[in-house]
Amino acid sequence: MGNSAPERSSLIRERLKGKILTSAECLEIADRKMGEAVADRRHGKELRATAQAWLVLAERIAQTEAIEALQAKGK
């Protein structure tokens, strides 16, 4: 099993150019990282921690999205 982290990192950087990720996209990344953690005995702990960080980010973005939706609805 090869390590495709550099390829995936560049994909994330490319997606970040000029836009903010949605909570759904962060959840997708967290899910992928957790899958990688299960398959990688050597770096599993780090990948689980990374997945957890993506989950926290997704939650914060979801809160921001909800606030923005309420503000837009109020206008």
Image (cartoon, rainbow, N blue to C red):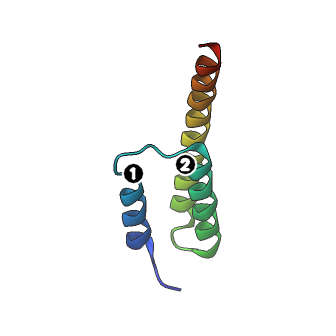
* Amino acid found under the numbered disc labelled 1: Leu
> Can you give x and y, in whole percent of width and height, for residue 18 in the image?
35, 46
Q: Nearer the viewer, mark 2 or mark 1?
A: 1
Q: Is residue 48 above or below residue 64?
A: below
The residue shown at (59%, 13%) is 75
The mark nearer the N terminus, 2 or 1, is 1
Secondary structure, mark 2, is: helix
Query: Between residues 30 and 15, which one lies in front from this camera angle?
Result: 15
Residue 66 appears left or right of 8: right
Q: Which residue is mark 1?
A: 16
Q: Residue furthest top?
A: 74
Amino acid type shown at disc 2: Trp
**Foreground residue among 5 and 46:** 5
- Number of residues whose C-alpha sits closer than 10 Å to that of mark 1, classed few (under 14), some (14–19) or many (20 or more): few
- Eyeballing the image, is 52 above or below 4? above
Q: Specify few, some or many for label 2: CA neighbours under 10 Å numbering under 14, 14-19, or 20 or more.
A: many
Which residue lies at the image location 51% right of the left edge and 68% below the top edge? 43
Place of residue 16 in the rendered image (x, y in percent of width and height, measured from the top left): 39, 51
Residue 10 percent across, percent down from the top left: 36, 65
- Disc 1 element: helix
Residue 29 location, quadrant? bottom right
Give the image quarter of residue 9. bottom left
Q: Position of residue 48 (x, y in %)?
A: 58, 58
Is residue 24 shown above or below 9?
above
Which residue occupies 53% across, 86% down?
Answer: 1
Instruction: Point out which mark residue 54 bears.
Output: 2
The residue located at (55%, 53%) in the rendering is: 49
